[in-house]
Image (tube, grey):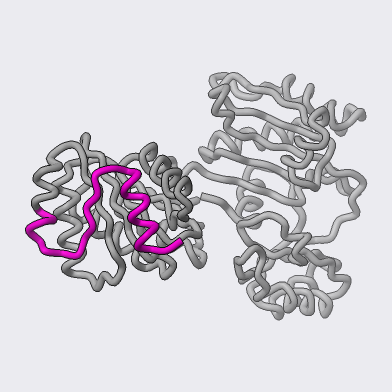
Amino acid sequence: MNLYEYQAKEIFKKYGIPVPEEELARNPEEAERIAQRIGKVVVKAQVLVGGRGKAGGIKLAETPEDARKKAEEILGMEIKGIPVRKVLVSEACTIKSEAYMGVVVDRKEKKPCVMVSPEGGVDIEEVARKSPEKIFKLHPDPVYGLLPHQARELCFKLYEDPKLAQEASSILLKLYKVFVETDASLAEINPLALTDKGLIALDAKIVVDDNALFRHPDIEEKREIEPGEEKEIKAKEHGLSYIKLTGNIGCVVNGAGLAMATMDMIKHFGGEPANFLDIGGSSSPEKVRAAMEILLSDENVKVVWFNIFGGITRCDDVAQGMVQALREMDVKVPVVVRLTGTNEDKGRKILEDSNLPVYPVASMEEGAKKAIELGGK
């Protein structure tokens, strides 16, 4: 779960990380009222994508009237296809320097990775590409966590002044605590700005592991469903893993590895998958029906390919779900089916006896080619 900047900063404040004076606005009038209280402000689009500044989603406002005007310009605009529905009206700060702080899960090391860089204010990926020597990393022991002397050592890479390094290390320790206690996969401050008031987190990003949200109902209630997320939410409710893509071949597969191989096969023969959809093991007819509903709600889907390898998943369960879904729903796209593994004969017999318009195939290669043929490239 990605948190908006304003939501991440609310968490930062609880942990004592300094942030600017700011408030959320959902219309230009609110932005003007907030600016009347704060003074000179920065109006920042609240969207879950990067590149807001380059897209014109961050603007400086000298007066309350200017804040209203800038909010009018930003609200309703689209950034990478996502409409802006709210802005953060934030105190404008005089910036002397900018740094980066972040904590991320390092899957290779199987530990958290703490990173700092004196090159703040830009994507850390860009710094890694152009100036990797300016990124300093440390992998704390997961049991002991980030220790004070480790934080100080990293922060002396950012500031020569001992007082500033000490102030920064205190913030870094708090950021690490945020990372651990929210079950985050990423927590970062970019930039950490040196201002007349000291060090301030001007921007914030937190990504919480979805699998840990049951421990954080206070965070889960912050979720705001954006256009395009409805399918992901519905899939999760039915125990499905779904990611929308841009192609026209809807894929229903059991197992993440087979799902990736299915998409690769489609691409190999010149097609474009419309999604990643893993129905998982022990798939009930209800899950298969839910998968069909999700796929068919995507107007880009011109053909559906069921690619099922029955291990724990029973092919007859999947076939029964397909029959139920196709009979109850107005399915106007062709359906390609590959069933192999546990109870595959029973599954094929169920489909054969149903007299439904499906296209059985024997192999992945045949399935990919048939789906591309029926759906068009």
Q: Residue at x 39, y 44 (%)?
A: 262
Magenta-colored span: 350-377
Residue 120 lies left or right of residue 301; in this view the side is right
Q: Residue at x 28, y 52 (%)?
A: 306
Residue 9 % position (x, y): 66, 51
Residue 363 lies left or right of residue 345; in this view the side is right
Work out whether residue 349 or residue 117 is closer to the camera in this orientation and state it: 349
Q: Residue at x 35, y 55 (%)?
A: 235
Q: Is residue 185 above or below residue 279?
A: above
Work out whether residue 170 or residue 134 is closer to the camera in this orientation and state it: 134
Residue 69 % position (x, y): 79, 79
Residue 302 lies left or right of residue 349; in this view the side is right
Q: Would residue 369 be counted in the magenta stretch?
A: yes
Name the dominant secondary structure of the magenta segment: helix
Quarter residue 109 falls in: top right
Q: Would residue 366 be counted in the magenta stretch?
A: yes
Quarter residue 137 falls in: top right
Residue 214 % position (x, y): 39, 45
